[in-house]
Structure formats: structure tokens, C-alpha cells
Image: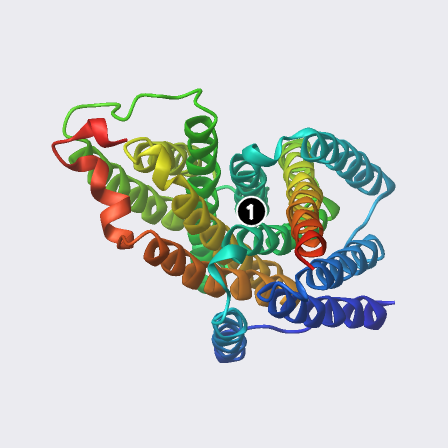
């Protein structure tokens, strides 16, 4: 059964790349998303037979979670107006980032549970622990940032500053998140990891709030690429190559797409990301 | 499971990044948003990772976080697909009207 699962993952990875390729041309775009869809179904069904999944309880929980999440997304995606599509992409992207952060949390928990005093680094290995934490911070930033992007596009959030001197707060938060990650790396599970996730979530909010609503599609594309990267890191942590390939492919193409979108608006990415820090907040 | 570690992982990572970059270099401006949505759907594969995480969860806390992760991942995949499909549906119609 393990071989069949691996074969399905392999086919899914191939279908994702070919699907993405087809999606970049107007003639084949619809075929492309269908191929990717087949790959997704293949990978999800195969995972139900994954040799690692043990216990009926967990299998039932998986089925229930997929049913609830899938039904919610199906319902909202079918109802949304065409003009509101970008913010729905932001929401689904944010959810993906949240899922990546959740995987990071479970990996970090598993690394240390039952063994008091074991550091995350020692329990998981330095490389896995590093990528688990990196994926955790990127996933969390993508999650909270995407949710702010959604609120901005949906005109639920109009303010463009949270605090005075936003840029210093952002730098400070980023530094704090990095320090907490180092602390979590060197100690066991508990407070450090909790604070680490809280700081990463706050960072996503603080980065996104100053950016103007008109620039949001580019920012959503950036978060999309970041979520892809986080998924790639999770693939390494879980030893799942389908995740590594799909995540990295999205990370790279999403990054390129972000630059192309910024270029189409005649702006540089740096200008978009940091424009809110200028003297003219009215521009948003 | 396939052992993915060290330099082998780095090679896979590099090749996947190049593939991702190369396959969309010629995308026309009109497809930017659908492509963003489509790649958003593809990273919905995170649901598979979440399923494995929940599958190996042992404590109630792990199960709770794993459950939420699967729920979010499934929503990412399903929502991403439906939204992309609807966007591209629009392309098909406008194409027919033009022809």
C-alpha cells in the first residue's frame, strides 16, 4: 500500500506542475485547473491509506474536518460575487497558511511531548526544527496577513495605521519573532512556542495594515507565494515530497507572479510593501 | 517513507523552484488573477500534510490542532478550486461571444 501512496503523490506532483503550466495560457487554462484538481483528489484519497495514519479516531476526525472545511469553502466560493473574487482568494490562501502553521505546531509538540526538558532542536534534529519554525512563522504571517487583506478589500477595515512609527514596530516585532524562534529552538515545548506563534500572527497584521487597498492583489499574491513556501517546508518536516514539490513550485511561481503583477501596475514590490510608511496615509 | 534529507532535499527544492519559475514566465496580464487563484489551490495540498499530522496525533491537544489544520487545509483546497474554476468559466464565455 505504501508504494501505491507514493505513486499517487508522484502523479499528483506531475499533474500540479503540468496544470500550472497549462494555467498560464488562456487556451488551456481550464484544462490546467482540472488536471491540478485530479492531482489533489488523488493525493487526498491516497493519504487516507497512508501507513502512518493510525487509529480509527484520528481517521474519523480527518473525515469530519475535511467535510466541514470543504463544505464551508464550497458554499462560500459558489456564492461569492465575481467582483469579490480577490478577497476570497485571500481568505482561502490565509486558511492554507493557517493549516501550515498548525502542522508546524503539531510537529513541534510531537517533538517534545512526554520528555520534559528536551529541546525542540534535540528532539527533531536541527534541520527539521529550523524548517518547522520557519514554516510556522511564514504560515502564521500569511494567515493573519491574508485575513487583514480580506478585511481591507471587503472594506471592513479602513484604517491604515495601528500605531505611531509603524516601521519601527514592524522591525521590532520581526526581531522579537526571530528571538522567540531561537528561544523555542533551544528549549522544550511550552511558553516560548506559544509566544512565538502569537508574535508571528501579530507580525502579519502589522505588516499588512499600512498597505493601501488598491495594492492588495499584489500583497495577496505575495502571501500566496509565502504559503507555498511554508507548505514546501512542511513537506520536508513530514518527509512528504508531494508537499515539497507542490509548495516550492507555488512559492517560486507565486514570487514571479507577484513581481509581474507589481510591474503591471508600474510599481516596485518594495514601493508597495512600504508605501504606507510614507507621509501620505491618505493614498490608501 | 522516502528519505528526504540534506542535499537530496536541497536538490529537489532547487529543481522545483526552477520548474515553478519557468512554467509561468509567459503568462499574459489577463491571467494574473486566475493564476494566483490556481496556485492558491495547488498549495491546498497542505491538507495532505495536515491529514498526516492529525493521523499521527496522540494527545488531545495535538488532535485539536491537527483537526483545525485539516479543516483549514480542506477549505483552502476546495475554495481555491471552485473560485479558480469560476474565474476561468468567465473566460470561456467571453471567448465564445468574441468568436
For the residue pair A67 and A180, the one nearer the viewer reads as A67
The quadrant of the image that shows the C terminus of chain B is: bottom right
In the rendered image, residue A189, in percent from the top left (x then y), is placed at: 48, 40
Q: Quadrant of residue A9?
A: bottom right
State the residue at coordinates (50%, 41%). Answer: A116
Instruction: Judge whether residue A188 can be spotted in this image.
Output: no
> In the image, is residue A104 above or below residue A204?
below
Which one is in front, A12 or A202? A12
Task: Answer above or below: position of A94 versus A260.
Answer: above
Q: Is residue B22 visible?
A: yes
In which quadrant will I find the N terminus of chain B? bottom right
Q: Is residue A149 above or below residue A245?
A: above
A256 relative position to A266: left or right: right
Residue A28's place in the image compared with B74, above or below, is: below
Estimate the x, y position of residue A92 in percent, counting from the top left: 59, 40
Near-viewer residue (A166 or B50): A166
Q: Mark 1: few, some, or many residues within 10 Å (few <14, many ≥20)?
A: many
Residue A94 is situated, as x and y percent measured from the top left of the image, at 52, 39
Instruction: Say which residue appears at 56% left-offset and 41% top-offset.
Output: A89
Local SS, label 1: helix
Instruction: Choose between B86 and B92: the one closer to the eye.
Output: B92
Q: Quadrant location of residue A238?
A: bottom right
Q: Chain of mark 1?
A: A
Left or right: where does residue A230 sit relative to residue A277?
A: right
Q: Which residue is mark 1?
A: A100
Occupied quadrant, residue A208: top left
What is the basis of the colouring in this image?
A: rainbow
Q: Position of residue A222 (x, y in %)?
A: 41, 51
Residue at position x 78%, y 40% in the image: A62
Query: At 67% from the left edge and 56% from the top edge, which residue is drawn?
Result: B95
Task: Give the number of callouts.
Answer: 1
Amino acid at each position: 500500500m505504501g508504494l501505491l501512496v507514493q505513486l499517487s503523490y508522484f502523479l499528483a506532483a506531475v499533474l500540479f506542475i503540468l496544470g500550472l503550466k497549462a494555467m498560464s495560457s488562456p487556451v488551456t487554462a481550464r484544462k490546467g485547473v482540472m488536471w491540478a484538481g485530479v492531482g489533489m483528489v488523488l493525493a487526498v484519497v491516497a493519504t487516507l491509506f497512508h501507513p502512518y495514519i493510525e487509529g480509527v479516531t484520528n481517521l474519523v476526525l480527518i473525515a469530519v474536518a475535511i467535510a466541514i472545511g470543504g463544505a464551508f469553502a464550497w458554499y462560500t466560493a459558489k456564492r461569492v460575487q465575481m467582483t469579490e473574487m480577490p478577497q476570497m482568494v485571500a481568505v482561502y490562501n490565509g486558511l492554507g497558511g493557517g493549516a501550515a502553521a498548525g502542522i508546524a505546531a503539531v510537529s513541534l509538540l510531537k517533538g517534545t511531548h512526554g520528555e520534559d526538558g528536551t529541546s525542540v532542536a534535540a528532539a527533531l534534529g536541527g534541520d527539521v526544527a529550523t524548517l518547522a519554525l520557519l514554516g510556522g512563522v511564514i504560515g502564521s504571517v500569511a494567515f493573519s496577513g491574508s485575513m487583514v487583506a480580506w478585511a481591507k478589500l471587503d472594506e471592513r477595515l479602513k484604517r491604515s495605521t495601528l500605531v505611531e512609527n509603524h516601521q519601527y514596530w514592524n522591525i521590532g516585532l520581526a526581531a522579537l519573532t526571530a528571538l522567540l524562534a531561537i528561544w523555542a529552538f533551544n528549549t522544550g515545548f511550552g511558553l516560548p512556542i506559544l509566544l512565538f506563534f502569537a508574535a508571528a500572527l501579530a507580525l502579519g497584521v502589522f505588516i499588512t495594515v499600512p498597505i493601501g487597498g488598491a495594492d492588495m492583489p499584489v500583497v495577496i499574491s505575495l502571501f500566496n507565494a509565502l504559503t507555498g513556501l511554508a507548505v514546501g517546508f512542511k513537506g520536508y518536516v513530514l518527509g512528504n515530497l508531494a508537499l515539497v514539490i507542490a509548495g516550492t513550485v507555488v512559492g517560486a511561481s507565486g514570487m514571479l507572479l507577484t513581481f509581474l503583477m507589481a510591474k503591471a501596475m508600474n510599481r516596485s514590490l518594495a514601493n508597495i510593501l512600504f508605501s504606507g510608511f510614507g507621509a501620505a496615509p491618505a493614498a490608501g | 517513507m522516502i528519505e528526504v534529507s540534506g542535499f537530496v532535499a536541497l536538490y529537489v527544492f532547487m529543481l522545483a523552484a526552477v520548474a515553478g519559475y519557468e512554467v509561468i514566465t509567459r503568462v499574459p496580464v489577463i491571467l494574473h488573477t486566475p493564476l494566483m487563484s490556481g496556485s492558491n489551490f495547488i498549495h491546498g495540498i497542505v491538507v495532505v500534510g495536515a491529514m498526516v499530522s492529525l493521523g499521527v496525533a496522540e494527545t488531545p491537544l495535538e488532535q485539536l490542532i491537527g483537526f483545525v489544520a485539516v479543516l483549514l487545509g480542506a477549505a483552502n483546497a476546495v475554495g481555491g478550486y471552485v473560485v479558480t474554476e469560476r474565474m476561468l468559466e468567465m473566460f470561456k464565455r467571453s471567448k465564445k461571444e468574441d468568436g
